[in-house]
Amino acid sequence: MPTEIPSNAEPLTKRETQILEMIVLGLSNKSIAAQLKLELREVEVLRGQLMNKLGVTTVRELIQLALSSGSTPGTVPKKK
């Protein structure tokens, strides 16, 4: 399981960052879609892109990576 953001990872888009913050807060895809006024499928696609960029395969890994990288709601994870 990755413990830091890969150095070659593409920067997250503003929308990916929003979705990451909401995932860390424990929101479901459906809740994220409603709050951001997006289609559920769009949230699913963005979440998949986010996970691919960060090299994780589970939501648990995604959250652990975000938290270990200093990401808290309102902040953007930085490459190490």
Image (tube, rainbow, N blue to C red):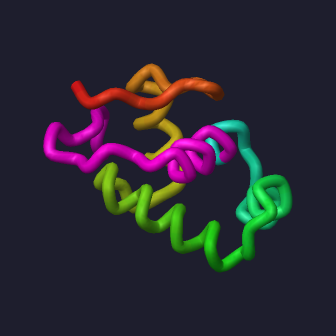
Name the one closer to the observer, 66 or 43: 43
Extreme residue in the bottom direction: 41
Which picture quadrant has residue 49?
Answer: bottom left
Q: Residue visible at 53% across and 43% down?
A: 17
Extreme residue in the top direction: 70
Where residue 42 appears, as percent x and y from the top left, is 62, 73
Where residue 64 appears, as percent x and y from the top left, is 47, 36
Relative placement, left or right, of 1 versus 6 is right
Where residue 63 appears, as percent x and y from the top left, is 52, 41
Looking at the image, residue 80 lies above or below residue 2? above
Where residue 46 appears, as percent x and y from the top left, is 52, 65
Extreme residue in the left direction: 8
Q: Residue visible at 29% across and 54% down?
A: 55
Relative placement, left or right, of 47 versus 1 is right
Q: Is residue 17 magenta?
A: yes
Looking at the image, residue 71 lies above or below residue 36? above
Q: Residue visible at 22% across and 25% down?
A: 80
Which picture quadrant has residue 25?
Answer: top right
Q: Is residue 19 magenta?
A: yes
Looking at the image, residue 47 lies above or below residue 18? below
Q: Which residues are magenta?
A: 1-22
Name the one closer to the observer, 80 or 56: 80
